[in-house]
Image (cartoon, helix red, strand yellow):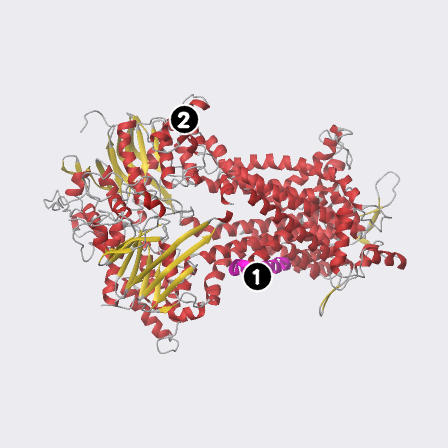
Amino acid sequence: MTLTPLLELRDLRKTYRLPRGRVLRAVDGLSLRVLPGETLGLVGESGCGKSTLGRCMLRLADPSSGQILFEGRDITTLPERRLRALRPRMQMVFQDSSAALNPRRRIGDLLAEPLRVHPAPDGRRRPASVIAARLSELMDLVGLPVQALERYPHEFSGGQRQRINIARALALTPRLVVADEPVSALDVSVQAQIVNLFADLRRELGLTYVFIAHDLAVVRQISSRVAVMYLGAIVELGETDGVLHHPAHPYTTALTAAVPRAVVGHPHAPVLRGDAPSPTAPRTGCRFHARCPQAQARCAQEEPALHTLRPGHAVACHFPLPPGP
Amino acid sequence: MMAALLRRTGQTVLVLFGVSVLVFGVFFATPGADPTARIAGRNAAPQVMEKVRHEYGFDRPLPVQYAIMMKKLFITRDLASYTNRGQAVVPEIMRAAPVTASLVCGAAVLWVTVSIFMGTLAAAMKDTWVDRGLMMLGLVGISIPVFWLGQVANLVTQSRYHDTWLFSWVPGLGYVPFAQDPLGWFRALVIPWVVLAVMFIGIYSRVLRHDLVALAGEDFMRTARAKGLSPMRVLLRHGLRTSMVTFVSLFGLDFAQLAGGGALLTEVVFGLPGVGRLTYRALTMLDLPVIMATVMYSAIFVVLANAVVDVVYLFLDPRVRDAR
Amino acid sequence: MPADPPLLAVRDLCVSFPARGRMVPIVEHVSLDLHAGEIVGLVGESGSGKSVTAMALMGLIDSPGVRVTGSALFRGRELVGMPQRQLRRLRGRDIAMIFQDPMTAFTPVYTIGWQIDEQIRAHEKLSRHAARARTVKLLADMGVPDPAHMAQRYPHQLSGGLRQRAMIAMALSCSPALLIADEPTTALDVTVQAQILELLRRLRGTHGASILLITHDMGVVAQTCARTLVLYSGRMAETGPTEAVFDRPGHPYTAALLDAIPPLYGPRPDRLPAIDGIPPQPADRPAGCAFAPRCGHAHETCLPAPPPPVPIGPGQQAACVLPAEGTPLPPRGPMTECTA
Amino acid sequence: MVALGVLALMALASLLAPLYAHDVAHTDPFASNVAGTIMLDGREVDIMQPNDNPLHLGLSPIGPTWRAAYLLGADSQGRDVAARLLYGGRNSLLIAAGAAVLCLLLAGVAGIAAGFLGGVVDTLLSRLMDIMWAVPVYLFAISLSIVMVSQSVRLGPFVLHADSLLIPVFIIALVYVPYAARPIRGRVLALRQAEFVTAARGLGVPVWRIMLRDILPNLATTLVMLGPLVMALALLAESALSFLSLGVQAPQASWGTIIQDGEGLIYTRPMVAIAPGLAIVIVVLALNILGDGLRDALDVRDSGRRAS
C-alpha cells in the first residue's frame, strides 16, 4: 500500500551564517515523509533543530537547500503570495502560548483573522455572521466559553491560551498541523488536558500531526510514529513503541534511559557523558560518535545513512543494537 | 579576532568617508545656493569671488570639489579663512583643542563620579525619599539649558555674590593655560566644569539607577545574595560592574561629542577659547571654512571614540568578546 | 528514621505578600523535617509556592511588605525573623542554594573561578591562591573536565551541564550542611539532567550535604528523594516517604497528578486521566480544601475549612478528609512495568 | 498628571499672548520702545533709565514692575519682556512640537523600513544614522542652520525663506532622527521576530495586514513614549539655536532669542534672561516627567508577566 505523503522533505538543509564565518547547521540533510492521518512525533534535545525543521515544513523559515512537498506539490520556492493560498491547509501551534498571541488584540479578533483574510471555499468573503458562528463553534471545540472571545490573551492561564492557539490553527480546517512543543510550558495536570485535546481533535477532524517535543512520554502518548533527531538529522525513525522500547540507535537508548520515571525504585545511571556538541562545530563521521558508548573507528570517519532495519524501523547507525526479546 | 578588528577598521573608515561627504554636502552642495559667496563672506569683491571659485574648483564637477576640499583639510592643511584675512584654519583648531580638552575632561571626571554615587545610592535606597529626591534632581538637571545655567552661574559668582566669601575666589571669565598656572587653570574651570556636568549627571545617574534596579531582579544578583555576600558587595561588585557596560558605551559617545565641539555653548558663555568658541566666532562672521573644519574635526573625533568604546567593550563584557 | 533532631525543622511556615491593599497568602502552614544526609523533595506545579518557601528559608525575599510567620529551626537556630546580618553569615556557608537556570545565575562579567573564589573568601580567611586551589578541586569533584582551565572561563563559554556543575561546586564550596536546589535540572536536557541528578545523589556520600530538592517533575522526585512533600496552591497536600506517597497516595491531588503523567512503558491509555480546571490564584483560594473544585471526591466536609494534615501511614500525612472519614483512596500499587 | 497640567497651562498662556499684550499690558512686544514711558504709581517713568553707577552713564531698561505692563521689565530695546515671553513661548512650543512630530514621522518611516525590510535597506539606513550620529547634534544643527539661515533654500517648487519658522523645525527634526530611529528600529526588529507575527504569517495573513494590525499597534507605545522626550530635546535645541541667532529670526521671538537679548543685561537686569530660562526648564521638566510616567505606565504589563 503506498499512500501519497501529505508532506515530504527531501534532503532538507537549513544553515545560518554566524559572525566570524561560523555556520550553524540547524537542519542537516534530512528526508522525511508524513502520511495522511498519522501523528509523527519528533523528539530530540534542545538545539537539535527540531523547531527549525517544524518551521521549514510550513515555509515559516526558508530552507537553504532541499525540497518540501506538500500534498505532492513542491512548495520549496513558492512565493509568499501563492503560499498564502495553501496556508489554510497547513497550520502551526507554537510552544509559547502567550508569545504567539498579539497582546493587544481580543481573542475574538485573533480567531477571526484567518477567516477574514481567506475566502470561503466558494471563493467569496465570509460574512460577519458566518465568522461569528464559526468562532463559537471553535470555542466549543477547544472547550472554552464563548464569553472568552471578548477578552485579551493575558487574562487567560497558559493552558487556556494554548487552547486558543489550537482553535486559531483549526479555524480554517487544516489537514496538517505542526505542533512545536505545545505542552512543554504547561504543568502536568494541564498538559494532560491539552494532550487529550489534541488526540480528540485528531479523531474528530481527521487531522495529521507533526508533534514536536522533548518529552518522550508525551510523544509516546500521542504519536503513531516517532523520529529521533540529533544535531539536525534523524537518527532513528519508526513505529512509536518499536523505537522507544526497542531502540536500535545508541542515542535513542540513552535518551529513553535518561527519562526520570515517576516510579520509585532503582534510579538509572546516566548512559551519556557530557553535553551535545554545538551545532556550529565542524564534524566528520557519525554525528553522535563523540558521545557514543559503542563508537568504533569507522564511526569517526564515515557518516551512517538512515537505512531500513526492519519494516517500519529505520536507523542511522553503523552498528545498530539488536531488537529486544 | 584579527578579522573582527579589520572589519571594525573598515567600518570606521567608511563612516569617516560618509561623514565627510555629509558635511561637504551640507555646506557646498545644498540646492539653490552659491557656495562661493559663502566662503568669500558677506559683500565680497568680485575678484575675491573669482579667486575663491577657482581655488575651490566650484566651476568643476562636485566630486572634484570634494577632492579639493579634502586635500585642503587633511593633506596640505592650508584651508584658510577669507573673512579673517587668510588665517589658516587647521592650526587654529589645534591651538583651541587643549582648552576644550581641559573643559571636557574635568567635567567628565565630575559627572562620572557624581552620577555613579547618585545612581548607586538611589538604587540602594530604591523607593525611598532619597531615591525619589535624587532622581527628581537628576531630571531637573537634564531639563536645564546649559547656556542659561552658565549665565545664571555667572550672575551668581561674578556679580551678585562675587564679593561674599563663597565666591570671591572665582576669577573673571576666560582661560588660563595649565602650563602657565595650574591653580589658575583649576579656578578658571571649576564653574564651567560644574555647569557642563549638570546635565550629564542627571542623565547618567538616572540611567545607572534604572539599570541597577532592573539588574536587582536578575538571577545572578539573587545568587550573589545566596552566597552570603553583603548587600554592598552585591550591589557594587555584581550590579555596578555589570551596569558599567552600558555606562561606558554611553560615556564614550557623549565624551566624544563634547570633546569634538559639543561643548560650544559652555565655551561661549564662559569665554573659553576652545574649539566650540572658535566655531561660534566663525558663525557670527559666517566664516564657512572654519565651521566646516571644526565640524569635520569633531566628527572624526566621535568616530574614533566610537571605535575606542568598542574595544573597551571587549574588556568589559566577555560575551561581546566571543560574539563577534 | 534517624532519631536525633532534624537538621531543618519547618513548622507552619506562612508567607504573604501585599497586593491591592491586602495580604495575599502565597505559602500557608508548610511544615517539614529534613534530617542530616537526607534528600527531601518539594514538589508542586508552578505557582504552588515551592520556590517562595525556599526563598523564605534563605531570607532572600525582600519585596516590601512581605510577611513571613511560623518557624524554621536550622540546627536549633530560628531562621524566621533572624537579622539579615546573621542570616548572611549562614547563607553560602551553612545553607547554600542552586538555581534553575545556570545561564543567568552566574554574573556574566566574571569568570566561573572568580565567582567561586568570592564565595569561599566571603566566609573563610583564605588567600586568593588557596581559594583558587579549592575551587579547582571542587570543580574536579563535580566532574568538570580540565578544572583549572574551566575556572578561567566565563559563564557563557560553558555548556549548560558544565555551568550547573560549576553552580553546584560553588554551592558546596564552604561545605554547607544543607543544600537547597531550586529546579536544578529543569533548564537542562534529559541526558544532562540524568548526569546532574546522579551527581546530587552522590553528594550525600562525598560531601555529606542534605538536600532540599524543589521540582515540578514527579519523575525527578521518584529517582532522587527519600521523602517527598507535595504542595498544592501554597498548601501542603501530602508528605511522607517517597515510596509510600507514590504507591499509596493519601491525597486525591497526588493520585491525580501521578495518573496524569503519560507512561513511557506499559499500555498506552486512550486518553490521559487529566485533572480538570486550573489551580486557583492565591488571592481567590477557596475557604476549604484548595483542590476541592477540581477533585472527584469533593463533598461538603471539604468546603468549610482547609483539612489539616492527618497521619495515614508511617511518616505519611495527607491534608484530606477522606482517610479520617474512613474512605481512603485505594493504593495505586507498584506500577506494572514492561521492561525493554 | 501634574506635568500634563503644567504643559497645558504653558501652552494656553502662550496662546493667549496677543490678549495679554493688547488688552492687559497694552504694549507692543515687537516694536522698539526706547523712548517710551509708562505710568508707575501715578508717576510717568522712562522705560530706559540711567544706570545707577556713580556717573549715571548709559541707559538700562526698567526692571520688573510687578504690574500688568512691563511685569518682568523691559529688554534693551524697551520691549515688554513678559509679553515677548508669551509670544516667544508660542514659537518655542510650536517649533518643539512640530519638530518632535516631524522627527518621529521621519524616524518612524526609517525605523520601520530598516527593521521590517532588513537586508540592504537596513544596512544602508543604519550606516546613514551612524554617519549622522557622528556629528555632534548641536554642531550638525548649527551647520544646517547657517546654510539655511544665510540664504533662502529652494527645494523644487518650495522656497524656504531664511526667516521661516519651518527651518528650525526641519533642522531639529532631522538631527534627532537617529536618536528616535534607533529604538524604533529595535522594536520593529523584535516585533518582526515575535512569535505572533510568525503565527500571523502561518495563517496566511498578508504582510501589509500584519504591519497594520500586529506591528503598528505594538509600536505605538514606543512612539508615544518617545514623543515627550523628543519634544524636550527639541525645545532645548531650539533655544540653543536661537541663542546663537541661528533659530528663530528677528522680529520673531522665542525663549532662546530672549535669553540672548538678556545676555548683555545679565548683571543689571537678570530677569530678562532668567524668565525665559525658567520657562524652558519648567516645560522641559514637565515633558521629561510625562515621558517617564508614560514609560512606567506602558511597561506595567511587561513587568507583571514576570511573576512566577
- The one nearer the camera, D25 or A98, is A98
Say left or right for D58 vs A289. Answer: right
Alpha carbons under labels 1 and 2: distance apart = 54 Å
Give the farthest residue toward the left: C326
Q: Is residue D112 magenta?
A: yes
The x, y position of residue D6, in whole percent, is: 59, 52
In the image, residue D55 sits, relative to residue A188, either above or below, namely above
Q: Secondary structure at mark 1?
A: helix
Q: Residues within 10 Å of mark 1 (few under 14, many from 20)?
A: some
Q: Which residue is mark 2?
A: C120
Quick check: C114 left or right of A139? right
Type of residue at label 1? Val
Q: Secondary structure at mark 2?
A: helix
Residue C50 locus on image (x, y percent): 30, 41
Query: Would you name the residue on which mark 1 appears?
Result: D109
Subunit of label 2: C
A249 or B143: nearer the viewer: A249
Which quadrant would residue C183 be assigned to in this image? top left
Tell which tag, 1 or 2, sits nearer the viewer: 2
- Chain letter of disc 1? D
In this picture, residue B87 sits left or right of residue A53: right
Determine whether, in the image, residue C108 is placed left or right of residue B250.
Answer: left
Q: Quadrant of residue B97?
A: top right
Q: Amino acid at mark 2?
A: Ile
Are labels 1 and 2 assigned to the same chain?
no
Residue D178 pos. (x, y %): 60, 54
Q: Which residues are magenta?
A: D97-119
Q: Is residue A229 above or below residue A200?
A: above
Front residue of A217/B117: it is A217
Q: Looking at the picture, how far across and down is residue B3, in whole percent?
A: 56, 45
Classify the position of the N terminus of chain C by image quarter.
top left
